[in-house]
Image: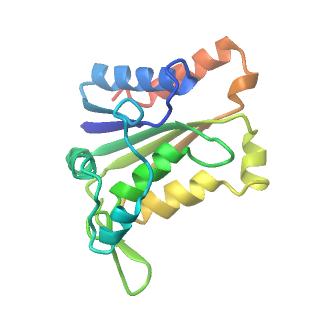
Amino acid sequence: MHTLVVLAHPYAKSYCHALYQRVVQQLENAGHVVDRLHLDAEDFDPIMRGSDLAVYARGQSDDPMVAGYQARIEAAQQLIFIFPIWWEVMPALLKGFIDKVFTKGWAYEPAKIGMKGHLTHIQRAVVITTMNTPKWAYRWLYGDAVQRALVRGTLRKCGVRKVKWVALSPVSHVTDARREKWLNQVGAMFTV
């Protein structure tokens, strides 16, 4: 399976980087074709500028990197997003990637009711997050923002039917043994 793994964390010593390395290793060991997309390392600019918005309604982007990212998603059968949850949402790096890359006409079309997704070739998407907020608080006090915005509000709307979210929490308050156990559990998801 051709898999695009998107990392949206700028710090090389973060737990997200450890997850990214483990996921890539497991995928490669299982025989997947792995496309690594480290947004910070590629100097991706997440800011939607006026020049981007001027052509957005036509399904275009003024960012020259967008067409390449779209081609990489078109080639993928599986998408994996790895990122921290900061202030209860995804980092600006990933939000800007979604805003710029998932354009009208390419990722979706407006429909009479809602939208028609074009990313139906994606067989599965996996969202792997780290955060310090306890899961129960994230869900009940903060409204599960990643579930609403990325899983349902973006991926499913754009035609990806099978989406799994793995929320690891609270990362800063666990032992190294627990972190290793999480690495093994996440890695085991990609052994086939």
> Residue 23 occupies which quadrant of the picture?
top left
Name the spot of residue 60 as percent of width and height, x first.
26, 65
Q: Is residue 51 above or below residue 73?
A: below
Residue at 76 percent across and 23 percent down: it is: 173
The image quadrant where one finds the C terminus is: top left
As drawn, is 74 to the left or to the right of 110?
A: left
Q: Residue at x 66, y 54 (%)?
A: 144
Q: Is residue 158 visible?
A: no
> Residue 93 location in percent, x, y?
48, 43
Q: Nearer the viewer, residue 161 or 75?
A: 75
Q: Residue at x 42, y 54 (%)?
A: 98
Q: Is residue 108 above or below residue 20?
A: below
Q: Position of residue 132 (x, y in %)?
A: 72, 34
Examine the image and state in which quarter residue 177 appears: top right
Q: Is residue 96 above or below residue 129?
A: below
> Can residue 6 be seen at all in this image of the molecule?
yes
Residue at 79% over, 54% down = 141
Residue furthest to the bottom? 112
Residue sitting farthest toward the front: 50
Residue 133 horizontal side relative to residue 99, left or right: right
Question: In what quadrant of the picture does the N terminus appear?
Answer: top left
Q: Nearer the viewer, residue 183 or 13?
A: 13
Count of numbered badges drawn on the protein:
0
